[in-house]
Image (cartoon, coloured by chain):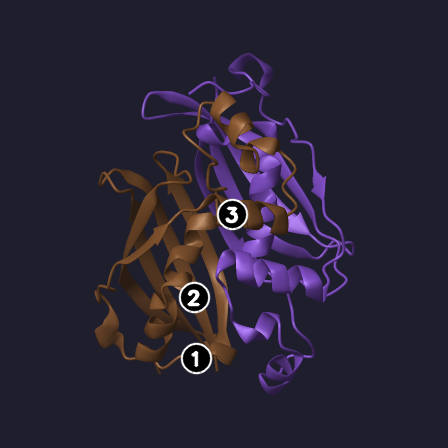
Chain colours: A brown, B purple
Amino acid sequence: MIDRKWIGHELPPSSLALERGRLRCFAQSIGETDPLYTDVSAARAAGYTDLPAPPTFLFGVELESGTTDELLKLLTIPLSKVLHGEQGFTYHRAACAGDTITVRSRVVDIYDKKGGALEFVVKNSEARNQGDELVAEMRTVLVCRH
Amino acid sequence: MQSESVVTGKDVAVGDELPPLTLPPVNRTLLALFAGASGDHNPIHIDLDFARQAGMPDVFAHGMLGMAWLCRMLTAWAPQSRLRKVDVRFAGITHLGNVTTCRGKVTEIVELDGERCARIQVSTANQFGQPKIVGEALIALA
């Protein structure tokens, strides 16, 4: 059983400086073919300051920082038991190479189904840029299978 | 923000289907590359020994890989600057060899914060028609 006392727990902030090489690597790994994700001049022609982060990229900020791993340890969820149940993004502005994105998250719910065979952890996050402007909100549901 | 206009408000109607996106079969190389690029290093996606110890028959794709593909379909239809929201549920595991097809269908034209938006039902399924992701997106119409 995951201790319900963690509902409301705020995670330490995670920051990631967005780099062109990393964004290109991500775009290529998902097979993205639109040049605006890999070619700076195409990105600028489309109105971006630099290569834009593709829509799901910011989910990785807390993976990269180790915050997601720390959360799983805190909740005593083994890596081998965790599944991604749901994911949501609400977008407010673009994040581009050159930006530094800071993600702050809070555990907003923990519940179980099937008599405790599955437990669910709901995490809400805000991603802001170096100017403290809201870039995106994220909602993550992690599932622990017992 | 200036961007190439793939869709405009006039073009879009309830019932419209987005051009589907079909991906190559999932293999181990892809999962290794996505693990590095996305920051998700969970060994269950890249290390067969770990996956077996966890009770899985083999490694399997990251849920977020499927969601990234789904978003590729959306941003091919309308520029990313018009994507307002995407919410999905991961309904099934994508196994090695699975060929994913992403689909979207306009279900409603709604007003959101003074903007006309298309509500799009989105999904992915493998070559056997087994659902992997279900959800919806909101895209602002120009």
Circle 1 marks a residue in which chain?
A
Residue at position x 37%, y 53% from top? A139
Q: CA distance from mark 1 to mark 3?
A: 46 Å
Q: Secondary structure at mark 1?
A: helix
- Mark 2 or mark 3: name the one nearer the start of the chain: 3
Badge 2: chain ID:
A
Nearer to the camera, B8 or A70: A70
Q: Nearer the viewer, residue A30 or B117?
A: A30
Relative to A129, residue A67 above or below: below
Residue B5 position by quadrant: top right
**Numbered circle sitting on residue A115:** 1
At x 23% / y 38%, what residue is drawn?
A131
User: For the residue marked with disc 2, what is the amino acid?
Assistant: Leu
In this orientation, which residue lies closer to the viewer: A112 or B118?
B118
Q: Chain of mark 3?
A: A
Question: Pointers 2 and 3 in contact (CB under 8 A)?
Answer: no
